[in-house]
Amino acid sequence: MFEPKIVCFLCKWCTYAGADLAGTSRLEYAPNGVNIRFMCSSRLDPEHILWAFQRGADGVFVGGCHPGDCHYQDGNYKTLRRMELFRRVLQQFGMNDRRLRLEWVSAAEGKRFAEVMDEFTEQIRALGPLELGSGKGGQHVSSKKKSS
Amino acid sequence: MKRIGVFVCHCGINIAATVDVEKVVKEVRRYPGVAHAEHYQYMCSDPGQKLVQEAIGKYKLDGVIVAACSPTLHEVTFRRASENAGLNPYQCEIANIREQCSWVHADREAATRKAVRIIESLVEKVKYDESLTPLSVPLTKRALVVGGGVAGIQAALDVANSGYEVLLVEKQPSIGGHMAQLSETFPTLDCSQCILTPKMVEAGQHPNIRLMTYSEVEGISGYVGNFTVKIRKKAAYVNWDKCTGCGVCTEKCPKKVPSEFNRNMGTRGAIYTMFPQAVPNYPVIDRDNCLYFAKGRCRICEKSCDLGAIDYKQKDKVLEEQVGAVIVATGYDTLPIDQLGEYGYGKLPDVIDGMAFERLLSASGPTGGEIRRPSDGQVPKEIVFVQCAGSRDPEKHLPYCSKICCMYTAKHALLYKHRVHDGQPYIFYIDVRTGGKGYEEFYHRVSEEEGVVYIRGKVSRIFQDGDRLIVWGVDTLTGKKVEIAADLVVLATGMIPSAGSQALFSTMKLAADENGFLSEAHPKLRPVESIQAGFYLAGAAQGPRDIPETVAQASGAASKAIALFSQEKLFHEPIVACVDEDLCSGCKVCISACPYDAREFDEKEGIVRVNELLCEGCGACVVSCPSGATQQKNLTDEQIREMVKASLGE
């Protein structure tokens, strides 16, 4: 069976803590995602998502605080706006934007984190592998910034 | 290249039962950059920590990864242990293989593979981690309190009593605020001035408080612990150093103008003190109404002053002061009744607001405490109180509940009955809200024992008919229209942010909500702080509230400032944004992305800099930067790219 590779960018205050709660509650879910901890979801550059797809990710998950709960006032709103714009870019690349998922998961929603992970893994499994990551994928995605 | 050590914890069987720790060690040992890897049963135990510390010396490690529980639990533990072994604490990272791996996956092989990926992505992070030290700056242990109402007075006294200096700035000639205008306070019926004036005097005489009345904050720059404030001391045209406050000049002044303090009932001179117990008790000349300033003649006050304190040539003074914290207590005003068309636009003399009724009730008010209506001085025998005048009216006026009006209206009706025994008060209300200690009991006393008639419904129109006012309303409990011929109508007008506060908030770069009240850093957990570091909020500037709440919040705000001042230096997490000055084009996009005002444009260099003490490290600006000039320390784009790569096993 195809096992999707998923990169998860989680904000430290809400979704990362929600993922921890899923752990302390011993809720089992699909092991396909690896979490990268950010201070705030607004640290996420759409470019990071491109890198993930470029390097073999089949799906990218972004988790932030619920609207109004951002530790930094309105970082999640910035993320929301950037994601909506970036979806259009993905579509223009000919990519299915369902490979990118943004969810607000609070520190109290361990159960939801587990459910969303399962659901997203199944969704990506159904979409099949994204063939950008076969090592030849680099040229499909260009980079905005000079890599320093 | 860095030499990185990886330490995998079994956590008893919490990790080891699902994750094959031996296999993890074997795999990560092969990963580029990893100089040493081992596993141990309880890494957080003393022997476990010692093991990490010894390995740092033995293998000359310059980066450490502890693969264990969530960083929220033991990041501090292992960073401290690393530091004690001579490693910079920011070279130690935690790989969360318990909460986010072993506890949530059942398949041993998959969990082991995932644990390796998690660790390897952190190896990539540590490779690029900089050695950081917490930022520290000295601070000025002196507070600025803006607003001299009961909130500002309380906050100033608390800070001053803790041994720190306070600058208390008030725009009026005297401190005291609205509380000084009130007659008696609900529900205990304490005389407002009797409980307030001792505090005013204490603030005025406190060795640690410098009172600056008739002054306004014009500008503020700097950051937490180190603000520079510009304060304009308005010309009083009286030399307060010479004046003794004898009051002869105010009596002799031939010009009479309506007294604002008395809600334009009664008069004051063009030279005046706000009220007899004013602190400081010195007069000011109201230039707009003074005959000398208008026509160049009069000078009666000058002649009446034996001390030569009158100084027509006095000018505004602008002072610059250094402070470390700012407590904002700019208070409220009430909704002007000339905005309420259905109640006569303020043109009916006997339709007054609650604050005016307070002055009628006050022993020091224009009628000496006798309830006499403004138009002809008659004692009103029938009086209508209208609650929610402007409040809870999202279509036309204020959408919110002003919180205090139910209680003060009940108090007004009670005090009226106490003075005019044969009088009949009616109260129109939407709901009666009595959340507060002793409030519900007080309301019952008024509504049941004192013969006050409560009518549930709104008033649609008030108009003059001869010497009486006709009040049209509806009783929504019976569904019938109500008409009352009243001698006086008192509108319980809602609270709004004080006049001029919006301009002041924008000068201070403080966020306000949609109604103009100050926004707190967190509505539940940080209610007395602003999101801007070093600014604290007290009283009705933040939203409608009563006196006990205001005083409690003022003490809360003061204690935040005191906690700040108790530190010798301010320390700040160094995970902040930084700017590559060669790449920055000065486009200023980052300035708008920063919620903390931590970005400053350097006019001379044409670049934007980061005030590291204000930066909270969210990283939003990094993403907004179109040239890649901005990075977040220890979470650079380069690190993220490599972490992503490693997490995918690439």
Image: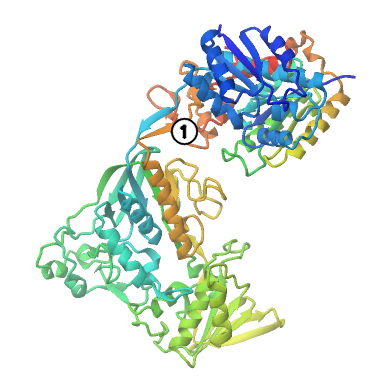
| In the image: residue B503, left or right of residue B638 | left
Q: Where does label 1 land, which residue?
A: B598
Instruction: Tell me which residue sits at (55%, 14%) in the image.
Output: B63
Disc 1 packing (10 Å; few <14; some 14–19; many ≥20): some
Is residue B599 shown above or below B362?
Answer: above
Q: Chain of mark 1?
A: B
Percent x, y of residue B212: 28, 54
Indicate the position of residue A110 as horizontal and vertical percent values. Answer: 73, 38
Q: Residue furthest front?
A: B47
Residue for point 34% across, 46% down: B143
Q: Is residue B406 above or below residue B241?
A: below
Which of the 4 quarters of the picture holds residue A41? top right
A71 to B429, vertically: above or below = above
Residue drawn at (57%, 21%) of the image: B47
Most extreme residue toward the bottom is: B422
Pick whichever, B612 or B483, lies toward us.
Answer: B612
The image position of residue A68, as x and y in percent, is 63, 44
Is residue B503 visible in the rendered image? The answer is no
